[in-house]
Image: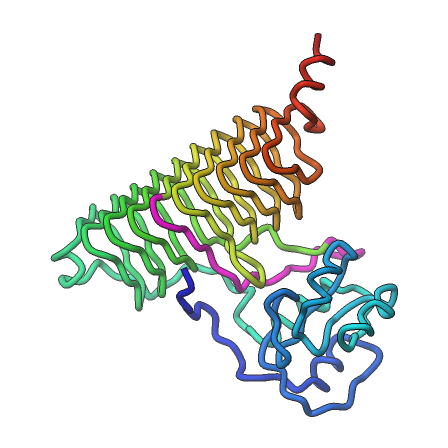
Amino acid sequence: MKTKVIFFKKKNYLLLSKISEAISSSKIKSNKKILDIKEISEATKNDISFFNSYKYIEILKKTKAEYVITHKKYEKVINKYCKPILVDHVLKAVAIVTNLFYPDSLNDSLDLNVLQPSKKLSKTNIFGNNVLIGKNVKIGKKTSIGHNSIIESNVKIGKNCRIGSNVLIKYSIIGDNVRIQDNTVIGKKGFGFLPLKNKNFRYPHIGIVFIDDDVEIGSNCTIDRGSLSYTQIGKNTFIDNQVHIAHNVKIGKSCIITAQVGFAGSSKIGNRVQIGGQAGISGHLVIGDNVQIGGGSGVVKSIADNSKVMGYPAKDIRIFLKNSK
């Protein structure tokens, strides 16, 4: 789904000199107009981005961003591909710049622009009692929404969907034939903060959630929206009850994820992956296609295609079973 939806109000541009002044001791005197802040893989020459780990060096080589927020230790490598803006704390600087572009990005309060479904929507859809629908919401034909559920402003939901009771959906785009069971929350702000010396510093999340066609999501699940990009659930993936999916996680097609699995932020899950109950996936990992992960496993490293793993830390299932005898 490539639909462009604006959930947060954004300033049209910021001057590079003003950005530099807000985050860096090395001031840049330039009236260049910066249009947005984006992840390094998505940034254009008129956007600003950031670099905070050598694991993203291959993405850096391909970036179109002219200016990148970074730490001094990465200065030499950055200079090969773009212009560095040096800061002491990269993620704190990114949070400050994001908040400059999106002044309301830290406000995640209840959407007060919600009303009972309109007569137009009610002609083609079924709504339970006390359903509330926000401004500019689009809902496809033959979709039903259960009692006490809230669909906040600008959300898009496809046709033939089944949304349970006590469900909250915000900052999300949902495809056709999707089923979401009771008490699930989709699109909330992720667990984004920086533990600094004197206090925890909140990190704004301006991304959204994409849920593709034919997905099923169980009861009491939580799916966080992206920080700068998006969280995604691929087509025909089935998710059991009480699963938590953190910000920027991208899950492929036709996956099976059983109860109480947890995904830390920014991990990428391939197609046809099967994960047993109560497994945990650490952040910023890549799980290949056709991977099987045993219940209760702790995945702390990326996993190649077609692997079967189990245990904590997760290892090849044959080694795990041999060592368990």
In the image, 118 versus 288, the foreground residue is 288
Residue 164 horizontal/vertical position (percent): 30, 41
Residue at the location (38% across, 53% down)?
A: 169
Quarter holding residue 96: bottom right
Q: Is 236 contained in the magenta span?
A: no
> Which of these two is toward me, 249 or 288?
288
Query: Where is residue 269, by image quadrant?
Result: top right
Which residue appears farthest toward the front when viewing the image? 306
Q: Indicate the quadrant containing the C terminus: top left, top right, bottom left or bottom right.
A: top right
Query: Relative to residue 25, is residue 123 depicted above or below?
Result: above
- How many numbered discs, if any? 0
Q: Is residue 11 above or below residue 122?
A: below
Mainly helix, strand or loop, the magenta region? Answer: loop
Seen at 32% across and 42% down, the residue is 179
Residue lying at the far top in this picture: please name it. Answer: 325
Q: In this view, does 21 lie above or below 148?
A: below
Q: In which quarter of the image is residue 321?
A: top right
List x then y, in percent, for residue 76: 87, 69
- Asked which colour scheme the image uses, the reply is rainbow
In the rendered image, residue 200 lying in the magenta stretch gets the answer: yes
**Span colored in magenta:** 195-214
Q: Which of 282 and 189 is in front in this view?
A: 282
Q: Tell me: residue 10, above or below residue 145.
A: below
Residue 281 horizontal/vertical position (percent):
62, 37
Q: Residue at x 59, y 67 (%)?
A: 42
Where does the image place residue 231, in percent across and percent down from the top left? 51, 53
The answer to whether residue 109 is left or right of residue 62 is left
Quadrant containing the N terminus is bottom left
